[in-house]
Amino acid sequence: MLWPLFLLVTAIHAELCQPDAENAFKVRLSIKTALGDKAYAWDINEEYLFRAMVAFSMRKVPKRETTEIAHVLLCNVTQRVSFWFVVTDPSKNHTLPAAEIQSAIRMNRNRINNAFSLSDQTLEFLKIPSTLAPPVDPSVPIWIIIFGVIFCIIIVATTLLILSGIWQSRRKNMEPSEMVDAEDKRENMITVENGIPCDSLDAKGGHINDAFMTEDERLTPL
Amino acid sequence: MEKARPQWANPLQFVFACISYAVGLGNVWRFPYLCQMYGGGSFLIPYLIMLVVEGMPLLYMELAVGQRMRQGSIGAWRTISPYLGGVGVASVLVSFFLSMYYNVINAWAFWYLFHSFQNPLPWSVCPLNGNRTGYDAECEAASSTQYFWYRKTLNISPSIQESGAVQWEPALCLILAWLVVYLCILRGTESTGKVEQLANPRTWINAATQIFFSLGLGFGSLIAFASYNEPSNDCQKHAIIVSLINSATSIFASIVTFSIYGFKATFNYENCLNKMILLLTNSFDLEDGFLTASNLEQVKDHLASAYPSKYSEVLPYIKNCSLESELDTAVQGTGLAFIVYSEAIKNMEVSQLWSVLYFFMLLMLGIGSMLGNTAAILTPLTDSKVISSHLPKEVISGLVCLISCAVGMLFTMEAGNYWFDIFNDYAATLSLLLIVLVETIAVCYVYGLRRFESDLKAMTGRALSWYWKVMWAGVSPLLIVSLFAFYLSDYILSGTLRYQAWDAFQGQLVTKDYPAYALAVIGLLVASSTMCIPLGALGTFITRHLKRGDPAPVA
C-alpha cells in the first residue's frame, strides 16, 4: 500500500533534481588533479558529506535555519566526478530559489573547499562564480621607490660633476702666469693647414729637408 | 691654430667604446630572428661573407677617415671635399632621429627593471576584473605578459590616429634614461670609453642589411670616436676586432635566444594540450586524469564516432596543438625583448634575479649605443667654432639631451609605440645606405684612393693592403647600390604601408593601413636626411659662386 506513495515521492524527487532543472546547479570535482596520489574515491559517503556541507551553508541563511541534509538532492553522478544538486524546502515539493543557494555557497565556499581538501579551481560550482583573492597592493608602488632612489643618485652625481667642472675651470682661471699659459698653448697647438693637421711632422724635433740632402754629396769624402 | 683635441687615455678605451656602440639591442633581438627565418645555421654563411666583404671594409674606412681628419662627421667630410659637408649634416640628422626614439627602449628597460623587485613578478599574473569574479577580460584574451606590455607599460590605443595623453610613468623613466646618458657624456670622450663588460636573395639581402646596421655605419659615431685617436693608432686592427666581436656577440645571443624560443614553444604547446584535455574531460564528463597527452588523439577519434552530435558542438573550440607551429612563430624587436623573454623569465626559479639581470643587460646594451649616438651629434657641434665659442660643452650636451627628451615624450603617449615603429623602420634605413654610399665614393673617387692611402701610411706607418682597396673602390659600393635598389623597389612595389595595431578585445595584433599624415611623416623622415647631401653641395656651390663673383682680392 505504501508502494505507490513511495513511487510518487521518488518520482517527485526525480523531477526536482535533473540536469538543467530549475534552481539546479552542476558541481564538478577534479580530485586526481588536486591530490594526485592522495586522491580519495568518490562514493556515497563523500556525497553525504557534500550534502551536509550544502545544508550547513543553507542553515546560515536567515529563514532557512531548519534545512536538513535530507533536503539536499543529488543526481546524475558521473565518472568525472560531476553531479547536479538542488535544495528543497521542508515540504519537499519546491526547490529553493537559485539566488539564495548561490549566495549561501559563496559565503561558505572556503569551508566547503576545506572539507574536501580542494580549491576553487578543483571544486567547481558552475554558474556560481567565486570571489578571487585580490593581489597584495602596497600603498606606494614598489617601482616608484626604486625609481626615486636611482633618480636621486643620478641627480646627485650629475650635480657633483657639473660643480667640479666649474670649480676646476675657476681654479685654472685664477692662475696668474699668462706666459705659462701662452707657452702651454703653443705646445698644445697643432698646426693646421687647409684644415688638415700637420702633426705627421714632428715640429719639436726639427725635420730633414730633402732639398738640402744633396749638399753633403758636393763635399768629397776624405 | 686650434686647441688640443681631447684623446682616449689608451687604445683599449677606444676599442671598448666602439664595441659598446656596435653591440646593441639589434644583436639580441634582430639577429636571432633572422637566423630562424632564413634557415638557422646556414644563415651564418651569407652573414659571415657579408661581414668580410662589406662590414669590415666600411668600418675600417669610417675609422680611418675619423682618425685622419681628426674631426666629427661634418668637418671630416667638408675637409675631403667642400661640396660634401651635406653628408656630415645628413649623418648628424639621422643620429638625431635615432637618439630621439632609441632612448625610449632604455626607458622601457628601466620600467621593467624597477618592476622586477616584486613577488610575484607583475607580468606573471593577470589582474582581477571589476567585481573580482574573474580575471581582466583583455588579459584573459591575450596572456599576462602581453597584457603587462600593451596595457600597463604602453597603455596602447587601438590605432595610430587615437593619440591619447602622455603617460607619466614611461615619461618619468624616459627622463631618467636621458639623465643617465647626460651623466655619461658630461665629461666628454674620456668617460664614454669606460669598460662595458660585448639561396634565396632575401637571405643575402638580410645578411647584408644586418651587418650594415649592426655595425652602426653612416651615423658618424665611428668617425667621432676615431677622431679622438692618436694619429698613429692602428685602426685597421681595431676595425677587425670590433667587427668580429660584434658578430660573435650576435651569434652568442642567438644561442641564448633559441633556447628561449624552444622553452616558450614547449611551454605553450603543453599549455595547449592541457587546455584541450580539460575541454574534452568537462564536455564529455570523462574520468579525471583519464585523458593524457599520449592518448588524446585516440580518445578524440573515439568520441567523434561515439557521440557525433555532442562532438560537433565542441569542435569549434578544439585546437590542433602543434610544437612546429609554436616554433615557427618567431618574434623580433620589442616584442621579443619585452614579451617573449619576460614570459620565459616568469616561469624560471628565482625569477626576480633573472629579470633584474636581463633588463640590466638590455640597459647596458642600449645606453652603450646611445652614447655612440650622442657622440655623433655632439662631436660636430663642439668642433664647430660658432657654437662652442658661445656655449660650454656641458651646456651643449644638456641642450641636445633636453631637446631629444622633449621630442621623445611623443613616444610615451598612448599611440607612442606606433610612432616608435615608424621611426624604427624608416628613420635610418634608406638614408644610411645612401650616406655610406656617398662616403665610399667620396673617399675613393673625390678625395682619391691613392691620396688617402698615402695619408694613412704617413699617419700609421703601415701600408694599405690591396684587399681594402679593392673592397672600398669596387665591391662595397656595388653591394650598397644593389641593397639600395632592392629596398627602394620593395617600398614602391608593396603599395600602401601597413602596421600592426593592438586589439584589446581580441587580445592580438591586427593589421591596419597608415593614415595620410603618418605616410607624410615617413616621407619627411627619409627625405630630410637624404636631401641634406645635394642641398649641402648646392649651398657650397652657390656661396663659392657668389664669392667668385665678388671682385675682392684673394691673397
Image (cartoon, helix red, strand yellow):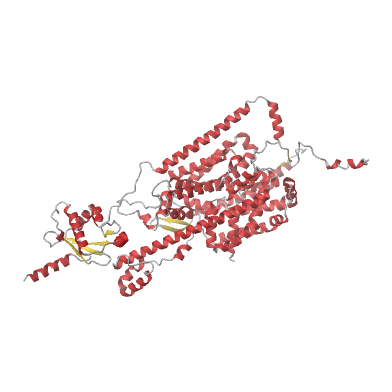
Residue B121, position as x, y percentages in the image: 40, 49
Position of residue A62 in the picture relative to residue B8 (left or right) = left
| Residue under the point 58% across and 48% down | B21
Count of numbered badges drawn on the protein:
0
Q: Quadrant of the N terminus of chain B?
A: top right
Please identify the residue farthest to the top as the structure is shown.
A176
The image quarter in which residue A27 lies: bottom left
Q: Nearer the viewer, residue A139 or B297?
A: B297
In the rendered image, residue A25, in percent from the top left (x then y), is placed at 23, 61
Residue sticking out furthest to the bottom: B305
Frontmost residue, B232 versus B380: B232
User: Can residue B73 be spotted in the picture?
Assistant: no
Q: Quadrant of the C terminus of chain B?
A: top right
Of residues B251 and A47, the one nearer the viewer is: A47
Q: Is residue A29 left or right of residue B262?
A: left
Query: In the rendered image, which quarter is residue A149 located in?
Result: top left
Report whether residue B316 is seen. yes
Figure check: A99 above or below B18: below
Q: Is residue B413 above or below residue B509?
A: above
Residue depicted at 37% across the width and 63% down the height: B274
**Where is residue B440 drawn, in percent x and y?**
67, 53
- Please provide percent x and percent y for residue B128: 33, 51
Q: Nearer the viewer, residue B6 or B165?
A: B6
Q: Residue at x 47, y 39 (%)?
A: A151
What is the residue that sits farthest to the left in this orientation?
A1
Task: Residue at the far front: name it.
Answer: A37
